[in-house]
């Protein structure tokens, strides 16, 4: 069973994503915006992929405000979690943002909100997990 960690500060988005992933994708879902918890779950190997909201308004790590880009950088810099796939999720998709966000964060993919094509959303997540299992 594939488990997805959703790091999202909007409870409605969290609910919508959870529903799509469990109903359409048959996936297990965990959700949190607590950065300490994200790091713990990632380091313990409890999830196969992380969906990371870029603009986390309330997240703080080690006394410093952090967004999804920063958290992804931490995960990618840690040998224990560097291989864990991270897909950035953002509503602020301007031309060129995708490349900038991916380059800055080292993330493995990018999804824009709102998610309109549920099938495509699930497919992208499953494909990213499958590619990482092969590598």
Image (spheres, rainbow, N blue to C red):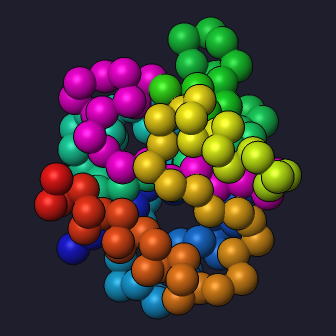
Residue 107: x %, y % from top left: 48, 43
Quarter of the view holding residue 65: top right
Of the 4 image quadrants, the one containing the N terminus is: bottom left
Q: Is residue 4 visible?
A: yes
The vertical placement of 112 against 9, above or below, is: below
Q: Nearer the viewer, residue 80 or 9?
A: 80
Q: Nearer the viewer, residue 71 or 112?
A: 112
Q: Residue at x 77, y 36 (%)?
A: 57
Please give left or right for residue 34 compared with residue 133 in the image: right
Residue 103: x %, y % from top left: 56, 35
The magenta stretch is 74-92
The vertical placement of 56 against 113, above or below, is: above
Q: Is residue 33 visible?
A: no
Please give left or right for residue 66 compared with residue 76 in the image: right
Task: Examine the structure image and report whether residue 75 is included in the region drawn in magenta.
Answer: yes
Q: Residue at x 65, y 24 (%)?
A: 66
Residue 63: x %, y % from top left: 62, 9
């Amino acid at each position: 069973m594939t488990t997805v960690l959703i790091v999202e500060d909007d409870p409605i988005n969290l609910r919508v994503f959870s529903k799509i992933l469990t109903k359409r994708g048959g996936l297990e879902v965990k959700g949190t915006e607590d950065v300490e918890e994200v790091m713990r779950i990632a380091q313990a190997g409890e999830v196969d992929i992380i969906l990371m909201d870029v603009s986390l308004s309330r997240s703080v790590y080690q006394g410093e405000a952090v967004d999804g880009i920063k958290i992804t950088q931490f995960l990618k810099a840690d040998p224990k979690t560097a291989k864990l796939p991270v897909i950035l999720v953002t509503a602020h998709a301007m031309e060129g943002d995708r490349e900038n966000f991916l380059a800055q964060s080292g993330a493995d993919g990018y999804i824009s909100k709102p998610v309109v094509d549920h099938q495509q959303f699930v497919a992208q997540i499953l494909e990213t997990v499958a590619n990482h299992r092969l590598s």
